[in-house]
Image (cartoon, grey):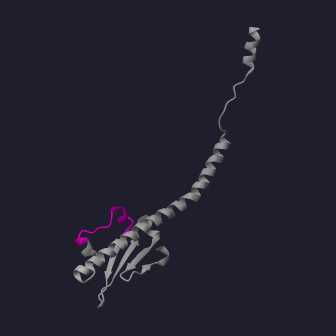
Amino acid sequence: MFMNVTRAIGVHRISQKGFTLIELMITVAIVAILASIAYPSYTRYVIRANRTAAQAQMLDIANRQQQFLLSNRTYATAAMLASSGYALPAELSSRYSYAITVGTATVPAYTITFTATGAQASDGVLTFNSEGVKAPAEKW
């Protein structure tokens, strides 16, 4: 009777478990398709997030301009702001350059221009002026 039990155990086969090469290739293809769809959306999201940071900085500069106007009866140029200690944050200065144009008419006026650079270059130019006009409108 002991012999029959031994033979019964010897008859069982151990099945191997795992993935075939075809299954792995299909999985890789699905992941590649999903990544090709997700990556452009991610880059657009990063550009929009950087644009929002630039817009917030433009509004901060506009606030500084109003304070400067109250103190000096004129708006500040970019050089004047820089000499007073203002600088773009490092994470923003690598993505945008800025300029301030001060009007010379009787009524003081300014225009803040942020120009996208580097990986952000596809975003273009953002402007904000002393009258509160934001351009281009579709990016605000």
- Quadrant of res 131: bottom left
In the displayed structure, 34 sits above or below 81; it is above
In magenta, the rendered stretch is 82-96
Pick the residue in front: 121 or 127.
127
- For image coordinates 34% across by 71% down, the residue present is 60
**How many callouts does the rendering have?**
0
Q: Quadrant of the N terminus?
A: top right
Could you say where residue 27 lies in the image, as x and y percent from the top left?
63, 47
Toward the top, the furthest residue is 1
- Quadrant of res 83: bottom left
- For image coordinates 74% across by 9% down, the residue present is 2
Could you say where residue 95 lies in the image, as x and y percent from the top left?
39, 66
User: In this image, 96 relative to 34: left or right?
Assistant: left
Pick the residue in front: 138 or 60.
60
Could you say where residue 44 lies in the image, as x and y percent from the top left?
51, 64
* 85 inside magenta stretch: yes
Residue 116 appears in the rendering: no
User: In this image, 73 relative to 58: left or right?
Assistant: left
- For image coordinates 45% across by 73% down, the residue present is 124
Toward the bottom, the furthest residue is 106
